[in-house]
Amino acid sequence: MMASRQDTLGRDTTAKVVAERLREEIQHGMLAPGTRLRQNDVARRFGVSTTPVREAFAQLQAEGLVRIDPHRGAVVFHPTVEDVLEFYEIREALESLAVGHAIPHLRREVARDLTALIDRMRRTEDARKWLRLNDEFHLRLYEAAGRPRLSGLIDNLRDASAPYIYMFVASRPVSERSNEEHQAILDACVRGDSNAAQRAIRQHLRDASKQLARFLSARDAETAP
């Protein structure tokens, strides 16, 4: 009985490692949207059995990063414009709620750290580094809300959005407008103006969703037969 339990723990750990590696490759654009993930190929690449790979696929499906097709198996999520707009509609509701809860608990040292993050975002021209700083800014701000379930939901949605956000950001220079929007969010939070902060978050996400929708529409038009 003890050996069986240890085997299960080992398999669970392996599945998490495989999921983590695949998640990183999807989010960084190394596995493009629409890529078919063959179970046996992934198992050979990571030197594991197919069981943890199958469990990793199920975990990534729950996160919205892959879809399990009855005929093709696991396929990296290929977002449509409608997918993007729905993701951002949900994010807008959750992230504006989080920032409203965060403001009364925003410590001075956290505000200083967020200011430093914006400064680093302004200085970098590396898309991948900018995206990491962008995620850190938002998630650090929402942590101040003290709502771990809310933060977890937002984190999952941001992870699911990451592949096509990376494609978009990597296709053009980093926008200074986004940095200014981050500054407007933080300024409102420091002032304790919840309404202004929530408006700034909603506007920030709406602008991003519109830009992504245009980007995906243009991409789909280019690849249409």
Image: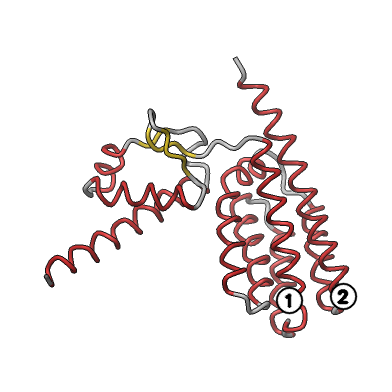
Q: Classify 204 as above or below 173.
A: below
Q: Amino acid at mark 1?
A: His
- Find residue 76 and report its horizontal and vertical position in percent: 47, 39
> At x 74% / y 85%, what residue is drawn?
108
Which residue does the numbered mark 1 point to in the structure image? Answer: 101
x, y (%) of residue 18? Answer: 34, 53
Q: Are marks 2 and 1 in contact (CB under 8 Å)?
A: no
Q: Which mark is residue 163?
A: none
Q: Earlier in the sequence, mark 2 or mark 1?
A: 1
Q: How is the image coloured?
A: secondary structure
The answer to which of 131 and 164 lies nearer the viewer is 164
Distance between the alpha carbons at the discs numbered 2 and 1: 12 Å
Q: Quadrant of the N terminus?
A: bottom left
**Image location of residue 94, percent across then percent down:** 69, 62
Q: Amino acid at mark 2?
A: Asp
- Residue at 33% x, 51% y is 55
Q: Label 1: few (<14), some or many (≥20) within 10 Å?
A: some
What residue is drawn where x is 40% and y is 38%?
74
Residue for badge 2: 193
